[in-house]
Image: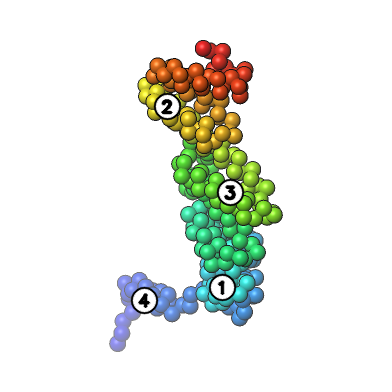
Amino acid sequence: MFKFTLSSLPAVALLCLLTACATAPKPGSTAKDPQSAYAEAKEFLDAGSYESAITAYEQLEARFPYGRHAQQAQLDTAYAHYKMGEMDAVIGAAERFSRLHPNHPNVDYAYYLKGLAYENTKRDEWLPFLPQQPLSERDKKGVQNAFETFKQLYQRFPDSRYAADAHLRMNILLEALATHELNAARYYLQRRAPLAAANRAQAVVKTYSTSKSVEDALGLMIQSYRELQLETLRLDTERVLRQNYPNSRYLASK
């Protein structure tokens, strides 16, 4: 006769649990058409359940890979990743969409999301409450990629609803890139490397000629040429500074 003991309960319970897990169906959409599947995924997105939305959109693409709902699912997936702070995933999803659907009426939005993601690539996903690092102090490559992406959007889709904001962000990013170079020039001058400082300051003047950093860059060039005892270059730079910024503090400090 089988004798049931308390000591056998954990094993029995574990066996039942494992059996149940092995036979339980995986959760998923029961929609029978792409319209219903998209509606389910969009409901998750609108509710702020971004992870569930991404899963639902992926299931939609797998079950109904063709048509406008699958295409919109790809765009919505990029947006959901953006809301979750997963910038690398946003960039990948946006690039995939623009590659697969270059003539889609909403491809401008893919460029816009990609630009926003590049703008935020150094954001700490684990500590979102901390203040963001200024653009001019971030990795230059991410800022440059953001600028180029917004530039493509602005030039390719001038009538886009995102064009004006893209142009505004281009100006902000341009200033950040110029400030980045200017900070490097200051660093080299402080480190007694006037030639390197002059080269970085000159890059600001040549590459970012419309930025607010040009006056400071010319001033740093004058200081660097003075230390290098390059009088001709110093005087030429002073002349340019005087023509463009007659009240510059760098002229008053001679």
Seen in the picture, residue 154 relative to 134 is either above or below; the reply is below
Seen in the picture, residue 251 relative to 172 is either above or below; the reply is above
Instruction: Using the image as rendered, state which of residue 213 and residue 230 is in the foreground.
Output: 230
Q: Nearer the viewer, mark 4 or mark 3?
A: 3
* Mark number displayed over residue 60: 1
First along the sequence among labels 1 and 2: 1
First along the sequence among labels 1 and 4: 4
Is residue 113 shown to the viewer in this render? no
Q: Nearer the viewer, mark 1 or mark 2?
A: 2
The N terminus is located in which quarter? bottom left
Instruction: Label 1: state its secondary structure.
Output: helix
Q: Amino acid at mark 3?
A: Lys
- The percent coordinates of residue 87 (x first, y second) are 50, 53
Q: Going 51% across and 22% down the picture, which residue do you hit?
A: 237
Instruction: Using the image as rendered, state which of residue 234 and residue 194 is in the foreground.
Output: 234
Q: Are marks 2 and 3 in contact (CB under 8 Å)?
A: no
Q: Are marks 4 and 3 in contact (CB under 8 Å)?
A: no
Q: Estimate the spatial distance between the alpha carbons at disc 1 and disc 3, rounded to whole Å.
A: 33 Å
Q: Going 64% across and 55% down the picture, which residue do you hit?
A: 157
- Mark 1, other Cα within 10 Å: few <14 / some 14–19 / many ≥20: many
Q: What residue did someone put label 2 on? A: 197
First along the sequence among labels 2 and 3: 3
* Mark number displayed over residue 15: 4
Q: Amino acid at mark 4?
A: Leu
Q: Nearer the viewer, mark 1 or mark 4?
A: 1
59 on left or right of 69: left
* Mark number displayed over residue 151: 3
Q: Are marks 1 and 3 in contact (CB under 8 Å)?
A: no
